[in-house]
Image (cartoon, coloured by chain):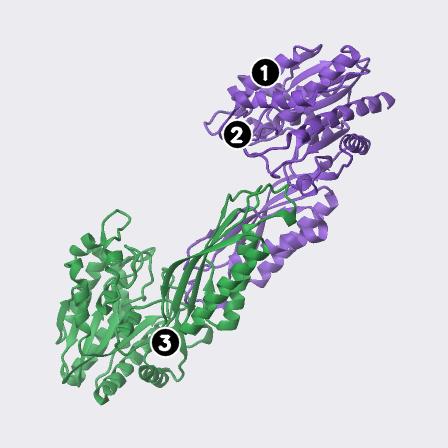
Chain colours: A purple, B green
């Protein structure tokens, strides 16, 4: 019986690294020559199989194995990386997908019961233009065209001009949405970008969805005053109010779950001899449950107003970004859970903090699930990103099982 | 009987403002042409009186009225201001001193029972070179010559070169210490640079001494981690520990008195999507009692270590600056208190948060006291610095009473 060869995937990942990474890590930034080279290399592997291959209007690369049914199983990843990135982020699943296509070629002579399509999304990371999920959000229809049209890289080159060099007419990118016609399920394997599986000592987990995000700036405004001559009870200390938020976010997650982060604090005038007049902090809140996320935001706002009042300072909020939670398909979650258990003996369900292309596919209405591979340091977007080779091999085998289960699932629906 | 004319002092302060201030405030920065002009104007007023006038080795201007006794009462102020400064800071007492010398000329025909000397200190503010109390610390002997020699202004001009243009041989500035020979008491009137007298609705107060200062930078070091994928209980959040200090400094002053200020907070990487890896804050602690100041510092260090341990982060301290408290003379404090009560009916004793030339004189061993004038906005180093004219007039009258009492006090010792 035909089967995947996970060791080959590990070898191919190492090959890819050999010509697309340097001492600082992977350098496959989308819409740059190294990225194009990595895609050419991927395409050469796909061309050895019985596949129709094309790039869509948003620079996503599609390889299609026609099946007995038009209804299609999609498997997706991304060859692009951040600068100084990890060797597994994104490309793990494009290469696992190639391996699954090889197995299907062997098993069904290139004509499986349902159509199977591998997609290499364009610019998942958004490293050059600061806008992630470019290709998948174009296909899902959620790309903000006006915003994307105005993006420039640090050399001042506009996104529409940059993508034109890679065969893309920017004004037509939303036409890539037609690729979802007949899409019946979407699967994505990705290295976990946190330490949850590492802490549990588990190789693989099934992802329940991606967190909704509320991202805000909060500015507390008090009064600058001399550090030596201003009595404590006369102070309007913006840092006192902001500092209280540092502990409050942990109380908010204790009550609601999810995660909260204050990533930046800026003080003005910011000198040793003055009470802080203005203190601006950022707040990033994430939860898989929309109602819980709204509650977290409400609690943070109430706390900030309470702290402002206690310290006789003002507070003003400014939303930087927001996205709703995206929940993956319950049926596919169960299949993924089963595939992992059959491969490793034990599985675990967890949400994804970071966004992924899978979220865009799910938002487009395609039943979706993701599988996470344990990250050795619980870290990504860094050259030290790594996983045990035995775990990488297990992930390829589990994805192959999941692909088979999903093909059955599609056939029966 | 001869008496001071406080209204004349107010008029002279307005005259001074008319040619040394602009729309942004006073511009009498030491060792600049506007400062030199203000001194020339002061000197012309002194030259109308029976005084010996000279500039010492540290650019301090001395005007001496020889008395029956060599033992000298010193009255000191400073003509220099910060850029965009207030109209009373420093020059109030040089002009009050001129008025007192006029009264003594009338009363004693220019030969009072003890010698009386007015000193206009050079560069109290340190605005050009970032080093305050230049002239008075040279005279007291506490000026750090190596540090001062290396100071440059923002145009790259070294302090020794700048002062040479104003007749100073930098290597000889400590010789100004000889001016303290025979000094028996030092009096300084200054606008309060805080809101204490304003809050009490009192025109004048007697100053007990200047706060000792402990000034430190504290760096908390944790681990950068993705805001979406890092569980709350896995975080090593440097801002969490630093934020706790914002409240702790108020608990420290509740227990010990004094004042504590966190004036600056800098976060790294300082982006909305990452837990803070490094957070540096500054701490400025001040107290009139040296033991209490040491206790405040001890408590801050212990708290920072406790917060670091709670959050699994590190903390490192770096002392930026330190000075011991300077206590004024108990006898002169009583005299000042009496002079204020006789002038206004009510007095108040308070410490000084900011440093003053008086602290250097006291460190040199000369019995010293200061009088504070209420500041209308509780603010200084700003063009809005102001006092009620009736309060300014009271301050001149009270200083004149204090001068008389102090001359008696010197005669009896």
Question: On the rendered image, what quadrant is the C terminus of chain A found in?
Answer: top right
Q: Which mark, residue A41?
A: 1
Vertical position of residue B367 compared to residue B213: above or below:
below
Element carrying mark 2: strand
Asked whether residue A369 appears in the rendered view, the answer is yes
Vertical position of residue B265 compared to residue A388: above or below:
below
Q: Which mark, residue B207?
A: 3
Residue bearing the label numbered 2:
A25
Rendered residue at 18%/58% (across/down): B170
Q: CA distance from mark 1 to mark 3?
A: 80 Å
Asked whether residue A121 appears in the rendered view, the answer is no
**Label 2 neighbourhood size at 10 Å, few (<14), some (14-19), many (20+)?**
many
Q: Nearer the viewer, mark 1 or mark 3?
A: 1
Task: Determine whether label 1 and label 2 are within 8 Å by CB.
Answer: no
Q: Earlier in the sequence, mark 1 or mark 2?
A: 2
Quarter holding residue A72: top right
Q: Is residue B230 left or right of residue B366?
A: right
Rendered residue at 39%/85% (across/down): B345
Q: Which mark, residue A354?
A: none
Q: Nearer the viewer, residue A60 or A26?
A: A26
Label 1 lies in what chain?
A: A
Residue A290 percent location from the top left of the image = 73, 43
Rendered residue at 52%/59% (across/down): B305
Q: CA distance from mark 3 to mark 2?
A: 63 Å
Rendered residue at 52%/31% (across/down): A84
């Amino acid at each position: 019986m035909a089967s995947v060869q996970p060791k080959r995937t590990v070898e191919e990942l190492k090959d890819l690294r050999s010509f697309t990474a340097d001492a600082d890590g992977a350098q496959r930034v989308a819409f740059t020559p190294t990225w194009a080279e990595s895609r050419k290399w991927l395409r050469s592997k796909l061309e050895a199989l019985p596949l129709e291959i094309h790039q869509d209007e948003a620079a996503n690369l599609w390889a299609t194995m026609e099946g007995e049914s038009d209804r299609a199983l999609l498997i997706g990843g991304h060859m692009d990386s951040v600068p100084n990135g990890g060797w597994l982020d994104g490309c793990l699943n494009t290469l696992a997908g190639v391996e699954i296509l090889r197995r299907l070629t062997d098993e069904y002579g290139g004509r499986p019961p349902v159509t199977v399509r591998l997609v290499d999304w364009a610019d998942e990371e958004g490293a050059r233009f600061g806008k992630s999920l470019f290709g998948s959000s174009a296909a899902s229809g959620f790309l903000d065209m006006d915003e994307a049209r105005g993006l420039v890289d640090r050399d001042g080159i506009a996104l529409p001009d940059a993508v034109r060099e890679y065969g893309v007419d920017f004004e037509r990118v939303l036409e890539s949405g037609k690729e979802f016609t007949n899409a019946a399920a979407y699967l994505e394997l990705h290295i976990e970008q946190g330490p949850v599986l590492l802490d549990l000592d588990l190789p693989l987990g099934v992802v329940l969805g991606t967190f909704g995000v509320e991202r805000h700036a909060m500015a507390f405004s008090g009064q600058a005053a001399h550090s030596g001559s201003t009595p404590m009870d006369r102070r309007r200390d913006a840092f006192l109010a902001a500092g209280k938020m540092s502990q409050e976010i942990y109380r908010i997650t204790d009550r609601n779950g999810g995660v909260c982060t204050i990533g930046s604090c800026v003080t003005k005038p910011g000198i040793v001899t003055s009470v802080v007049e203005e203190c601006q902090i950022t707040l990033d809140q994430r939860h898989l449950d929309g109602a819980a996320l709204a509650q977290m935001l409400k609690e943070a706002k109430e706390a900030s107003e309470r702290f402002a009042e206690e310290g006789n300072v003002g507070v003003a909020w400014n939303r930087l970004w927001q996205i709703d939670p995206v929940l993956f398909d319950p049926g596919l979650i169960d299949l993924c859970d089963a595939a992992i258990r059959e491969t490793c003996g034990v599985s675990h369900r967890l949400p994804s903090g970071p966004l992924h292309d899978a979220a865009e596919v799910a938002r487009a209405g395609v039943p979706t699930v993701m599988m996470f591979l344990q990250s050795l340091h619980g870290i990504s977007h860094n050259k030290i990103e790594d996983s045990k080779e035995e775990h990488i091999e297990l992930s390829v085998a589990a994805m192959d099982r999941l692909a088979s289960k999903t093909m059955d699932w599609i056939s029966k629906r």
